[in-house]
Image (cartoon, coloured by chain):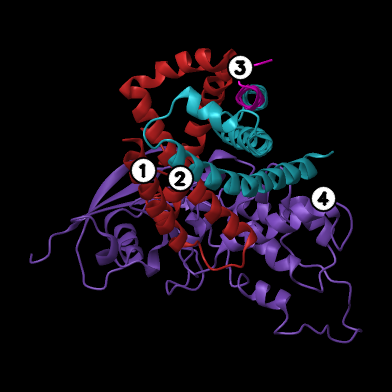
Amino acid sequence: MRSRPTLDLRAKSHLYYLAFACHRISGLLLACFIPLHFLMLSQSLRGATGFERSLGLTDFWVFKFGEWVLVVLLAIHLGGGIRILIIEFGSWRGLRKGWIEISILFAIGCGLLFLYFAN
Amino acid sequence: MNTAVLQAKLWYAQRISAMILGICVAVHLIIIFYAIRGGLTAQEILGRTQGSVSFALFYEIFVLACFVHAPIGVANILQEIFPKGGLALPLSLVLAILILLLGSAAVFGLFTGGAL
Amino acid sequence: MSNADLKVKVWRGAEQGEFVEYLVPRNPNQTVLDVVTYIQRKLDPTLSYRFACRVGMCGSCAMTVNGVARWTCRTHVSQIVKGDSLEIAPLNNLPVIKDLATDMREFFNKWKGAVGFFKGSQSRHDDFAKVEPQSEERQLANAGIECIGCGVCYASCEVVQARPNYLGPAALNRAWTLTNDIRDIQQLDRIRAVAGDAGCHACHTQGSCTERCPKGIEPTASIAGLKRLVARAAIRGSKWGKL
């Protein structure tokens, strides 16, 4: 005896749900990160040397990797967000698969650009 | 304000702030890619931001847009995951305050360079 | 036997129950409804399920097949079988009466709740209303009026699962078509009904409704239209009055 089945992954295995999930997850992670990012930047209130010392904390590779992840998350969320705005405010032309493709390419592009410029 | 009007206004505010953020994020990404070439020091950052009114204006608008956009999004998510608890409103308000205070502090700090 | 039997797991019970496996001979051109019918007629007459037209017009046979809401009469086994297995369950998001039959009352009550019904101001003594076929409203309404209330979109929506009082894609789609019916006189009530916590703004554009609708209707488009309409009404007031 068990409870009746409910909506599971099989019902959600389509492109538009995946786009929603990426947008939601990237948004949540960004919401967690942004206050920390602002906190870091507000160390500039300590003046140049105090700020430099705080920035020095981020020299560990885990922070660098985290920064890269955040740029990619930002790109994903921006791409997905523009898609939603076009769906909700633009003329109806379906669920805009093209914009999903652009977002993926944009995120990859930003990830690569960050690696290129940061090194 | 009844709940229908409130929900509609929150939705609208989140979408308008999203449009503003779309522009701000695009510009910010370009600035970041430009700035991180060859590493980034506090001196370099402050060299660009200290005393720059356009910097302060742009980023304060950015902070205000975040302050509207993120808490509404987070509140929606919390309302769905914890429908019975009253977590959504307090947690979103905390996020909103954090973004507004820390963000404005960051803009102020970078504009003044710590020279208060 | 040249064809292996199908191993078909069918939900038996109500909110509590279990999947029971049946062996069903495989046939060419077999639909999932054929499979369910075979089980009930030849293997277990206590199985409860719904169907009517069995030719893809009425929507009564909608069930969850391998996790996805479908019309079973229009789903060929060969299309969706996993090896030689099938899993058939009642539609999600609706209470189970017995086995594969769900209680559709809340689905239709939400339709009413969204003011998804017509009310005009004219009578048989008045002249015909004139609705321009090429007008924007008529075109918008056309896109959504073929809905037959099968419940597949409602059963596929994660927001319905997460928010039990969310009106759902079918009700909102119907409400949208009626906001574009220039003869209807309940527009203000309708806008009020589709706003709020349980209304159009709860939609996250996941698109499962549009993806699964067997008639190719796009409730996501209708809901987007309602979002704009309601937001404008909340801020500037609508052409039918203040929200």
- Give the amino acid type for the residue marked by disc 1 in the picture: Gly
Q: Which residue is mark 1?
A: A111
Mark closer to the observer (1, 4) = 1
The residues bearing labels 4 and 2 have C-alpha atoms spaced at a distance of 31 Å
Q: Of circles 2 and 3, which is in front?
A: 3
Q: Are marks 1 and 3 in contact (CB under 8 Å)?
A: no
Q: Colour of chain B?
A: cyan
Mark earlier in primary sequence (1, 3): 3
The residues bearing labels 1 and 4 have C-alpha atoms spaced at a distance of: 40 Å
Q: Are marks 1 and 2 on the same chain?
A: yes
The residue identified by callout 4 is: C235
| Numbered badge on residue A75 | 2
Chain containing mark 2: A
Residue A63: in sight, yes or no? yes
Residue type at tag 3: Leu
3D distance between C-alphas at marks 1 and 3:
30 Å
Q: Position of residue C182 (x, y in %)?
A: 80, 73
Q: Which chain did the renderer colour purple?
A: C
